[in-house]
Image: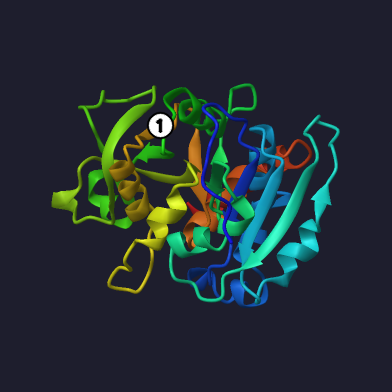
């Protein structure tokens, strides 16, 4: 039976759910042999960056939501990782299966018993949140916003060109936004993949959430969309019916969401991170300059 959903007023959020069961169909044939979440970006798999981000923000337990076609994820991470030379604390890993890929909400529902009555993070396993090392992580700001506002949910957001909003979950701010918002702002709701003319803003979900455990009640009461999928943003809107506020935390200058949803973004981000490599980045840069000169 699920644990009753009760939350202290201010908590250290120590659990994170990482959905990683998707088919990766736009990266075939690579993903027919290997999970997209373990594809290398520079020297490390995508999921290694996600795990480091979670550890830096205080998470101590991570649940991977996987499919039975992805045993390599458990093979790579095992059941725990110890403290690192960089001072990151130990973290414990758990695994659960999403039997059918029926959307982001369904993936989160797979974690209900494991989460229990605690607030938690959701971090999608095919997206890296890239931020300067010296700054507080976007996720740390999200957790602070969640606690200081006793929120029902907090969403990381980024601005995209208006003509691309139909691809994303789009947030609906309660008040008009500045041109480049830098502070958290409250939401009226979220619209999943709206038509361009119906989009309430050009600020879209950037693959990270902090959620009150009441989200599970909302997910159980959510109806599937026309594709038969249960969308996490739809359930977040239902939280407001329980008088639980929703907030957005914007990515700042120098921060970015890096996804590997298709070959274009995968190639781009592999090169981006490889160019930062302390040992080989400069030689790669020289090689690319040489190749581009040949192409001209």
**Total numbered badges shown on the rendered structure:** 1
- The residue drawn where x is 35% and y is 45% is 239
Instruction: Give the secondary structure at mark 1.
Output: strand
Identify which residue, 296 or 286, lies in the foreground: 286
- The percent coordinates of residue 223 (x first, y second) are 31, 66
Q: Is residue 102 above or below residue 121?
A: below
- The residue drawn where x is 65% and y is 65% is 96
When asked about the image quadrant of residue 38, the answer is bottom right
Residue 293 appears in the rendering: no
- The residue drawn where x is 61% and y is 62% is 65
- The percent coordinates of residue 254 (x first, y second) are 50, 28
- The percent coordinates of residue 176 (x first, y second) are 20, 27
Q: Is residue 222 above or below residue 165?
A: below
- The residue drawn where x is 84% and y is 36% is 84
- The percent coordinates of residue 267 (x first, y second) are 55, 56
Identify the image quadrant of the N terminus: bottom right
Label 1 environment density (alpha carbons within 10 Å; few <14, some 14–19, many ≥20): many
Identify which residue, 171 or 276, lies in the foreground: 171
Identify which residue, 11 or 143, lies in the foreground: 11
Q: For the view shown, which residue lies furthest in the left direction?
A: 197
Residue 245 appears in the rendering: yes
When asked about the image quadrant of residue 166, the answer is bottom left
Colouring chosen for the image of the structure: rainbow
Residue that numbered label 1 is attached to = 250
């Amino acid at each position: 039976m699920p644990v009753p959903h009760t939350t202290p007023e201010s908590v250290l959020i120590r659990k994170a759910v990482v959905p990683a069961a998707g088919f990766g169909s736009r990266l075939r044939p690579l993903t027919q042999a290997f999970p997209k979440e373990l594809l290398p970006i520079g020297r490390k798999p995508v999921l290694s960056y996600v795990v480091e981000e979670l550890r830096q923000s205080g998470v101590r337990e991570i649940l991977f939501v996987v499919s039975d076609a992805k045993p390599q994820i458990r093979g790579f991470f095992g059941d725990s990782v110890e403290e690192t030379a960089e001072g990151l604390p130990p973290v414990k890993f758990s695994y659960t299966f999403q039997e059918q890929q029926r959307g982001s909400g369904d993936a989160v529902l797979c974690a209900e018993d494991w989460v229990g009555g605690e607030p938690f993070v959701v971090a999608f396993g095919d997206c890296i949140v890239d931020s300067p090392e010296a700054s507080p992580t976007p996720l740390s700001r999200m957790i602070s916003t969640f606690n200081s506002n006793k929120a029902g949910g907090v969403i990381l957001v980024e601005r995209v060109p208006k003509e691309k909003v139909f691809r994303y979950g789009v947030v609906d701010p309660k008040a008009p936004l500045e041109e480049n918002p830098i502070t958290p702002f409250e939401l009226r709701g979220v619209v999943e993949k709206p038509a361009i003319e119906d989009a309430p803003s050009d600020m879209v979900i950037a693959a990270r959430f902090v959620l009150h455990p009441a989200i599970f009640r909302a997910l159980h009461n959510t109806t599937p969309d026309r594709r038969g999928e249960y969308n996490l943003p739809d359930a977040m809107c239902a939280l407001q019916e329980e008088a639980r506020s929703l907030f957005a935390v914007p990515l700042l200058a120098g921060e970015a969401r890096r996804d590997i949803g298709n070959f274009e973004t995968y190639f781009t981000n592999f090169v981006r991170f490889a160019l930062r490599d302390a040992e080989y980045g400069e030689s790669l840069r020289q090689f690319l300059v040489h190749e581009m000169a040949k192409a001209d």
